[in-house]
Amino acid sequence: MEKVEWEDVQRLVLSGYPKFPFSAYLFWHFVPGEVGAAKRWLGSLAGRLTCAVARSDRQAINLALSASGLKRIDVSDVMLNGFSPEFLEGMAPKPTASGPSRRTSALGDLGDSSPEFWDWGGWNQNGNVDGVLLLYAGNKSSLMALVDTEIEAMEGAAEPALRQNGERLVLEGRIYEDRKEHFGFKDGISQPMIDGSPRTSKKRNKTGDPDENKELTADEKRVHLVKPGEFILGYRNERRTRIAGISGTKDGKGAEARDIRRNGTYLVFRQLEQDVPAFNSFVANAAERIYRRADEPAREKIAAQLVGRTREGHPLVPAGGLGTSSRNDFLYHFEDRFGMVCPIGAHIRRANPRDTIGPDADTALRLSKMHRIIRRGRPYGERLDAAGSDPAVAQVPRGISFIALNADIAGQFEMIQHSWLNNTRFGGLHAGTDPFGHFGCASDVVAIQSRPSNHYIDRPRPFVRVRGGAYFFLPGIEAVRALARPQPV
């Protein structure tokens, strides 16, 4: 097994920072023409970045750069061409005379979720950003102080990006004590585990980080253990290949240059706005239609069938668990092949089919590991109580800052989005898309398997809307230092 250089990997790859429930995502642009100042800032920042093996009780800082950001600090074309086409083209390529780009259509960023209407990252003025600082702290005041400190440190080299309304583009995130997002479900439960990481090692350091200290069973390893190359460039993946080489590449003059991709990963950022009243209304109407009542038990059952878990995070599979099991090593093929317990189109079943998409269960499980992503997103915006009693609070935007880490944007994030979440034929279905997705189609429905016949519930429109997004590269710390050197990379 390859040994990952964890001291060079940014800690976000291993941890969602549960000890730091407050976060801010600060988007910025390099100051035009100030390449020297930009490099000096990156050099200083490299020493403050939190690495995978670091322990901090105060705060955490991570950095990601967009393709435009790399270009602005004079990264050579030779090096840039080693990055994936998806990263270089960006999440929202400009439309052509014939309509939206192939990527926009594949991601389902159409209608209200079109980049035309995004607050940032889209087609409007100030759409592009050069990078993002991901900042984490234990309380709100410490977080705001950290934001101010980092904005001051970048002065003359970079400046905060702006929304369309002229406000600074800073998205605040929050992990609540119950770990629930705005629709009321515990989030971030099922994550892949990187083979060889401290969490999977027999000699683990006991820390206060729940991301690392949960004991792993043999079944959990079988289902969730994934080769490091699926997430970190330069290592073997589930196909036993490397997306980026181990050794340095050649620069334009034939000299050896550090491969700045090594120990890095691609970071997908999507600002997803959630319409909580619309979701609650849909759940109540569906409960009335299927169970002829809309009391709390009926609503909770519908909500769980849409996700595949109860609001407390318990999976509906195994069938005998009745949504009370804490298992996460379950499989669908033998436990619920036909979706009678967890509907085939449920969110968690689409996002991670486990052992169902393939010629047989074992092959399907191996194939699914080639498409896993690490999720590090957090809710933003003020919480709305279940009754939505305060109209003023109900109008405040809220949602998820969706963050995904993967080594292959096309084969992981984009494949999941296009082929599983947005697919009306997923798993043998004949209609409907992900109940929690932003993409809707004509006559969109939610299918719930039942006997003697399935239930099909009309979904008038998605409960989620894309408000911004971009593809970034989360470099290794040595790569940040290499980018900071005066000579071109």
Image: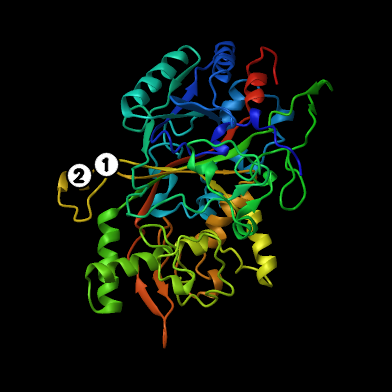
| Residue type, label 1 | Glu
Above or below, 166 relative to 96: above
Please give the residue where the numbered disc 1 appears in the rendered image. 382
Residue lying at 53% horizontally and 55% vertically, measured from the top left: 417
Q: Mark yes or no: residue 218 visible.
A: yes
Above or below, 213 relative to 280: above
Task: Find numbered disc 1 in the image and state the secondary structure of the residue it sits on.
Answer: loop
Q: Colour mode?
A: rainbow
Q: Quadrant of the N terminus?
A: top right
Q: In the image shown, does 43 or 127 lie closer to the viewer?
A: 43
Above or below, 27 relative to 310: above
Q: Are marks 2 and 1 in contact (CB under 8 Å)?
A: yes
Q: Position of residue 212 (x, y in %)?
A: 54, 42
Q: Position of residue 322 (x, y in %)?
A: 40, 71
Marks counted in the figure total: 2
* Mark carried by residue 411: none
Q: Position of residue 105 (x, y in %)?
A: 52, 54
**Residue at the far right in the pictured view:** 254
Q: Residues within 10 Å of mark 2 (few under 14, many from 20)?
A: some
Q: Position of residue 169 (x, y in %)?
A: 38, 30
**Disc 2 from disc 1: Cα separation:** 7 Å
| Residue type, label 2 | Val
Q: In the image shown, does 468 or 227 lie closer to the viewer?
A: 227
Of mark 2 and mark 1, the one earlier in the sequence is 1
Please give the residue where the numbered disc 2 appears in the rendered image. 393
